[in-house]
């Protein structure tokens, strides 16, 4: 980045890097590609200056000498600016490049030797004319010359190539100049439209069909030049988006990529390859055209990193700073500030690169011929640097396309791409070939643990079904995995390919569309994979410590790298453990120490974070799934996961650093909101594994966990992380986290305090959790949490006030009539606990109209709901008589419930009736008229029903705390005897006889 200074004005397409941002641009408008408009039409152009014939002849002679001179030594900036300002040079160039209207004159003019030189001169002037009025005139003149040469019969290939190269060279020069000043440049105004029209793609609004590329480009040489220029412009646009640039260049880069998405450019490039290959050896430039078209396709999917690259500031390379961002977990483990980590590229449309890749994949899937040519290039390695090798570009196109386009992956498998890729894994691009193989296989068999839908196997899936061919592929890959190559990327990439193959072994595809016997049985992997030496080799890879600043596979995949070095290795362990407990493959892996090594990888995250930093979001998900398999199949794995170090690492995944970085990671690569939800749920699932539920006091849940585990959860602030994580979840995604919160709150008052401190009762949070559209499991657990908070309220831990401030009364009213009986029962229990310790909520219950809906639940079809409704009504009348009038309609239902099938319900009903006279005689008359006194006497005389085996424990607990219907009925009768009206009625009903009968009863 340049040292601080006043930022120079920028024309369209120039922008500062994040380190050197311009304060403003020059206001020059861009007529480049517009978002969603396809290829834009050409804008109006300035009129051409006029000069006399004598002036023209004199200027042309001078220009010819100048052009010859500029060929040998490019114009210096000062010299170019002087020529642009002298009033004669530009006019002369425009005259020299003016297309003659007469056909014969035009033919002679196109064949002149001076014309290519004058085009090169115009290109050099154009390079230095940014922001000047002369720029558009020069550009239009060059375009007109190229178009005339292409339309000539026969086409004049030299002039077509010279015209395209003139635009391309001017753009390259501008890119170099901007890069040297810390800025970037995309393309000249309207050049993209020119390139597209030279490929036979009409501008937007023109009712024209696609033209054959050879015809539109004036022959294969012209097509090759256009493809090369297009590739460089697209590379610069991709680089600008991926490097996190800001300003006009970013907007133009996005416009260009949007125009690519809205155009048939990839399919037209496929047509170039098809046509030029057919003309190979017979037409000049055919081979160059097919190679250039491949490089243009590669430019659409592969962005070369500038990290340590020589082309970082070259015309066709990526801008400085175009490097892959660290994976979200690496950002969480980093010591850098969060703002510094997530400030890159937030202005850019991060989905655009994958949209372009998807378009390329779709085009290749629809062109079996082009796909076959790509595989032929893959099979034929070439000499030279990676950027010039066709096999390198073919691999990149296949890799990136297959990753986002399952149709291409399926077509590639049917075209025998796996065999072609396996044949070159020992070559110069071995890691790239293996990554490409993995992308192709995962596009067919699923990625990240996903499986094809049973009974719907397609031909590509059947082609990957376990067979001698796939066995042989696995044997070869296993050899690469354990080869001990100097390049560790080879072994790790081989692990990913093995894992992809194994998915078809764990769940083989079926030829039957519908099978009554379910999925086919798993097929064991080749024995060579699980020999002691191979098992030990995998352990060595798990213990490998990556080096370098960024993702190690960035050099293979380009920017942005979406595959971590450890992704494939974790996927391999996950695939083998997927055979399940007791399977030979899983047992061999666990006995070989794979499970413990994986658990140790998590435990050592803080002390040795390099390995976990090489896990992409998809790799993290596979790691969590594999750890779950380890915990289910290996007791030692559970012990490691319940240790402090492992818990700290798991909670790190729920932290703001990780979830924030994951949120902005593309959803197509395992990030975004779906990725956040998956990680939260998988992490919570692992955290709760060591927690075993037991029944505690008063039937409430308690937790039995390894020594110190709950204390570690408290110490590490797990509740705060869980509550914050809820903001990122919706619907059924809330089930697991809310359940863990519920279990923790019910197990310890300290967790209850942490829940409130974390904002769990903030109106925004709790009202969203109590939304009636949530899953019943979520609602039940949330109601349990709030109910427990109300239940444990004490002077030193007042929960009533924060519950009141949560304003959940409208939620309670709606949930009282919920369709799920479990929800109705738990909301009645909540109201009961809100009234348990004091009359704090009495007024609010009355104001918000909750009493009558609560009374209605006494007649609910669900027995638990009736039981808790009686409990709530009883507590609503316990502390004072302020709700007696509102509770008057409850008397008749409560009397009816004295004959309920459940002892606890009868006891609750009896207690509620007694509480309705505890504080006042206001309801005595109503109780007498409803037969409550007579019913209570009957209850006192009715023997308790013998409990079922299922309810024996709860009945015993109820009896031990004085909760039997007989005892509660007698207590309530005692409350009624305090009032004259009730006492006289009881005497008339023979209460003394009842007392005499019960005097010898142990229950009474």
Image (cartoon, helix red, strand yellow):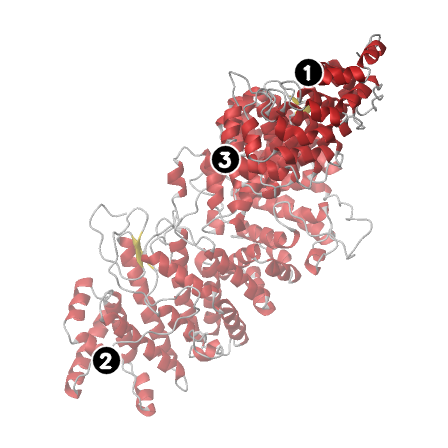
The residue sitting at 33% across, 92% down in the picture is 104
Foreground of the two, 911 or 779: 911
Q: Which residue is mark 3?
A: 763
Q: Position of residue 455 (x, y in %)?
A: 75, 54
Q: CA distance from mark 1 to mark 3?
A: 44 Å
Check contact, mark 1 vs mark 3: CB within 8 A.
no
Q: Viewed as shown, does residue 537 lie left or right of 969?
A: left
Q: Is residue 249 shown left or right of residue 800?
A: left
Q: Nearer the viewer, residue 488 or 371?
A: 371
First in sequence: mark 2 vs mark 3: 2
Quarter occupied by the C terminus: top right
Q: Position of residue 834 (x, y in %)?
A: 59, 26
Q: Residue at x 52, y 32 (%)?
A: 723
The residue pinned by badge 1 equals: 979
Question: How packed is label 3: few (under 14 Cα within 10 Å), some, or many (20 or more)?
Answer: some
Q: Nearer the viewer, mark 2 or mark 1?
A: 1
Query: Could you tell me which secondary element the residue under label 1 belongs to?
Result: loop
Q: Position of residue 934 (x, y in %)?
A: 79, 22
* Residue name at image x 49 percent, y 79 percent: 209
Residue 139: quadrant of the picture: bottom left
In the depicted structure, whether residue 77 falls above or below residue 182 = below
Q: Is residue 874 above or below residue 144?
A: above
Q: Quadrant of residue 683?
A: top right
In 3D space, how far apart are the residues under numbered discs 2 and 1 (Cα atoms)? 112 Å
The residue that label 2 is drawn on is 48
Of circles 2 and 3, the one toward us is 3
Label whose residue precedes the other's in the sequence (1 or 3):
3
Q: Position of residue 422 (x, y in %)?
A: 61, 53
In three-dimensional space, the C-alpha distance between marks 2 and 3, rounded to whole angstroms, equals 70 Å
């Amino acid at each position: 980045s340049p040292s601080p200074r006043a930022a120079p004005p920028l024309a369209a397409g120039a922008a500062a890097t994040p380190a050197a941002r311009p304060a403003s641009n020059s206001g020059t408008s861009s007529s480049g590609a517009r978002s969603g408009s396809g290829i834009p039409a050409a804008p109006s152009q300035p009129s051409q200056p006029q000069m006399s014939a004598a002036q023209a002849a004199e200027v042309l002679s001078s220009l010819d000498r100048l052009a010859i001179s500029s060929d040998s030594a490019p114009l210096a900036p000062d010299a170019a600016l002087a020529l642009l300002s002298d009033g004669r040079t530009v006019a002369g160039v425009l005259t020299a490049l003016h297309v003659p209207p007469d056909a014969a004159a035009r033919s002679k003019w196109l064949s002149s030797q001076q014309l290519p030189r004058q085009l090169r001169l115009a290109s050099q002037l154009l390079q230095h004319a940014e922001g000047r009025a002369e720029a558009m005139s020069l550009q239009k003149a060059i375009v007109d010359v190229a178009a005339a040469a292409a339309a000539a019969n026969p086409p004049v290939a030299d002039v077509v190539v010279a015209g395209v190269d003139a635009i391309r060279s001017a753009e390259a020069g501008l890119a170099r100049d901007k890069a040297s000043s810390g800025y970037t440049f995309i393309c000249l105004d309207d050049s993209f439209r020119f390139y597209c029209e030279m490929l036979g793609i009409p501008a937007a609004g023109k009712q024209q069909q696609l033209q054959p590329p050879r015809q539109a480009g004036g022959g294969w040489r012209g097509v090759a030049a256009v493809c090369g220029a297009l590739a460089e412009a697209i590379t610069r646009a991709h680089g600008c988006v991926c490097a996190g640039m800001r300003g006009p260049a970013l907007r133009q880069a996005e416009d260009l990529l949007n125009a690519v998405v809205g155009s048939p450019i990839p399919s037209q490039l496929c047509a170039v390859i098809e046509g030029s290959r057919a003309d190979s050896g017979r037409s000049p430039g055919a081979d160059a055209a097919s190679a250039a078209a491949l490089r243009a396709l590669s430019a659409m999917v592969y962005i070369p990193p500038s990290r340590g690259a020589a082309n970082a500031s070259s015309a066709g390379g990526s801008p400085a700073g175009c490097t892959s961002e660290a994976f979200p977990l690496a950002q969480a483990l980093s010591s850098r500030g969060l703002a510094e980590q997530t400030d890159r590229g937030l202005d850019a449309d991060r989905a655009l690169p994958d949209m372009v890749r998807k378009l390329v994949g779709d085009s290749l899937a629809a062109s079996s011929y082009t796909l076959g040519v790509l595989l032929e290039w893959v099979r034929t390695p070439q000499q030279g640097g990676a950027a010039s090798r066709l096999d390198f570009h073919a691999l990149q196109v296949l890799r990136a396309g297959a990753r986002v386009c399952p149709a291409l992956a399926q077509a590639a498998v049917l075209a025998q791409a796996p065999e072609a890729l396996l044949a070159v894994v020992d070559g110069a691009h071995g890691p790239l070939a293996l990554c490409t193989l993995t992308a192709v296989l995962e596009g067919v068999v699923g990625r990240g643990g996903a499986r094809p839908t049973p009974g719907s196997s397609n031909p590509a899936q059947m082609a990957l079904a376990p067979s001698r061919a796939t066995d042989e592929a696995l044997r070869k890959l296993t050899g690469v995995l354990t080869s001990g190559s100097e390049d560790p990327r080879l072994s790790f990439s081989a692990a990913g390919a093995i894992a992809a193959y194994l998915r078809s072994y764990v769940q083989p595809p079926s030829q039957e569309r519908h099978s009554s016997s379910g999925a086919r049985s798993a097929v064991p992997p080749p024995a060579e994979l699980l020999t002691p030496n191979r098992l030990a080799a995998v352990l060595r890879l798990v213990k490998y410590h990556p080096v370098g600043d960024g993702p190690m596979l960035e050099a293979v995949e380009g920017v942005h790298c979406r595959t971590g070095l450890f992704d494939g290795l974790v996927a391999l362990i996950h695939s083998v453990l997927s055979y399940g407990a007791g399977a030979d493959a899983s047992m061999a892996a666990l006995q070989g120490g794979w499970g413990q090594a994986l658990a140790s990888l998590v435990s050592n995250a803080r002390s040795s974070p390099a390995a976990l930093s090489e896990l992409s979001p998809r790799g993290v998900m596979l790691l969590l799934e594999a750890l779950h398999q380890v915990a289910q199949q290996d007791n030692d794995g559970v012990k490691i996961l319940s240790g402090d170090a492992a818990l700290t690492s798991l909670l790190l995944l729920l932290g703001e650093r990780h979830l924030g970085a994951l949120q902005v990671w593309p959803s197509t690569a395992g990030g975004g909101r779906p990725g956040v939800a998956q990680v939260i749920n998988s992490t919570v699932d692992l955290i709760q594994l060591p927690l075993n539920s037991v029944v505690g006091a008063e039937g409430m849940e308690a937790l039995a966990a390894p020594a110190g585990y709950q204390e570690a959860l408290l110490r590490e602030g797990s509740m705060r992380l869980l509550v914050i994580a809820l903001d990122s979840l919706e619907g059924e995604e809330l089930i697991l986290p809310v359940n863990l919160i519920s279990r923790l709150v019910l197990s310890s008052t300290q967790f209850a305090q942490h829940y409130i401190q974390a904002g769990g009762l903030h109106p925004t949070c709790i009202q969203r959790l109590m939304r009636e559209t949530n899953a019943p499991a979520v609602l039940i657990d949330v109601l349990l949490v709030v109910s427990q908070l109300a239940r444990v309220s004490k002077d030193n831990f007042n929960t009533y006030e924060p519950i009141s401030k949560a304003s959940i009364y409208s939620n309670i009213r709606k949930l009282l009539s919920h369709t799920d009986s479990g929800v109705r029962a738990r909301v009645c229990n909540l109201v009961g606990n809100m009234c348990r310790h004091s009359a704090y909520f009495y007024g609010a219950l009355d104001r918000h109209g909750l009493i009558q809906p609560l009374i209605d639940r006494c007649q609910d079809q669900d027995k638990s709901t009736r039981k808790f409704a009686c409990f709530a009504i009883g507590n609503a009348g316990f502390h004072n008589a302020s709700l007696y009038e509102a509770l008057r309609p409850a008397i008749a239902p409560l009397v009816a419930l004295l004959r309920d099938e459940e002892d606890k319900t009868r006891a609750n009903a009896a207690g509620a009736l007694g509480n309705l006279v505890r504080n006042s005689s206001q309801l005595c008359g109503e109780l007498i008229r409803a037969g409550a006194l007579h019913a209570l006497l009957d209850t006192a005389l009715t023997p308790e029903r013998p409990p079922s085996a299922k309810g024996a424990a709860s009945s015993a607990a109820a009896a031990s705390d004085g909760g039997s219907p007989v005892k509660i009925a007698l207590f309530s009768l005692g409350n009624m005897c305090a009032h004259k009206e009730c006492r006289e009625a009881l005497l008339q009903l023979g209460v003394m006889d009842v007392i005499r009968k019960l005097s010898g009863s142990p229950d009474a």
